[in-house]
Amino acid sequence: MNQFPAGTDVTVTIPFVDRNGAALPAAGMALSYTVLDELENVVQTSTDLPAPQTSDTGVTVTIPRTANQLAGPAPNISDGVATGNPIITVDGLREIQLTMTTAAGQFVTKIQYLLKASDAALVLLQNSFQTYNLSLLTASRLVNLQSWPDAAEGDRINALIQAWLRMTKLGYFVRWPRDPDAQNYLNWFDSRNEIIIPRLWTVMTTQRWYNYYPENFRQAMRDAQVLDADFLLTNDVYQQRRDAGIIRERVGESDIQFRNVKPLNLGLSKAALARLQGYVDTKYTITRS
């Protein structure tokens, strides 16, 4: 699917075909089109086009920039209350529905294209722990990255977003650095130690992120995001077999042996989990109110 910067004119060519892809003759054809968004709301109402020439096999349509705008920031609503950072729209979709009226009847063909924000595809604490430029800096400090160095920007961004989604399904226990003698006080455990349950990520604010947690934790999360993105970009067939539980495979007279227990899967790559060692909290606490 083609991609275009949001807020620009988009020109596409739509062929005269039916639902089965068969060509429709242009002679005597009347044309109109409608533009919808990703929620199938009408962005541009039905607009007539000039009649095509009999030799035409398609029509070129220009969708004006006014119909290709992304929505502005929206409140982050939780239980009816605006919480966390506002939601920034970073992408969208447009569908052009071309209506072709012929002597045989009316036919509709559809073309979709993507709209991408021109400034930032990654938004801190909305779909990433870092901006794209910061992820490049983060990656430059890591070793043994497999696929990240040669991946395209769009693939890196998609992998970073997927890594964010995987990481925010976990809970974390963050300890602030302190003098060991602080344990002499009764409330030492509660003093600046923070437990992040998974649902907290949806309402996490930038102010909380930068003031409630130490930088070494934030850096670990940035590193782990890039490491997990690199894992997602890498098609490691041997790792896939290990994850499937294969412990022996013999070629020739086919023989595959699986381990008799399911391997532990926390939803992150081993490299990312290793970087988050000491932070991931897999415990669930049940209390009475």
Image (spheres, rainbow, N blue to C red):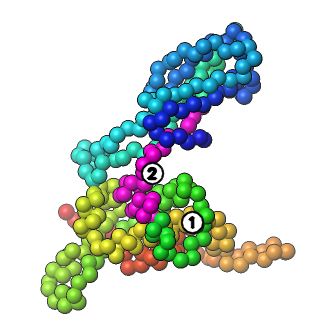
Residue 287 visible, this orientation: no
- Read off the magenta span: 111-135
Which residue occupies the foreground of this view, 137 or 148? 137
Q: Which residue is mark 1?
A: 148
Q: Quadrant of residue 71?
A: top left
Q: Secondary structure at mark 2?
A: loop
Name the residue located 14 percent from the left edge and 86 percent from the top edge: 185
Side of 24 relative to 76 (left or right):
right
Residue 163 vs 172, above or below: the answer is: above
Q: Quadrant of residue 278?
A: bottom left
Name the residue located 26 percent from the left edge and 81 percent from the top edge: 177
Task: Name the image quarter holding the C terminus.
Answer: bottom left
Q: Position of residue 11 (x, y in %)?
A: 57, 31
Q: Is residue 284 magenta?
A: no
Give the distance between the C-alpha atoms of the residues marked 1 and 2, in whole angstroms.
17 Å
Residue 174 vs 166, above or below: the answer is: below
Which residue occupies the foreground of this view, 58 or 273? 58
Q: Position of residue 266 (x, y in %)?
A: 48, 69
Residue 121's mark? 2
Q: Is residue 123 magenta?
A: yes
The kind of residue on which mark 2 rests is: Ala
Residue 269 vs 31, above or below: the answer is: below
* Mark positioned earlier in the residue sequence (1 or 2): 2
Label 1: few (<14), some (14–19) or many (≥20) C-alpha neighbours in 10 Å: many
Name the residue located 45 percent from the left edge and 59 percent from the top edge: 132
Side of 34 relative to 188 (left or right):
right
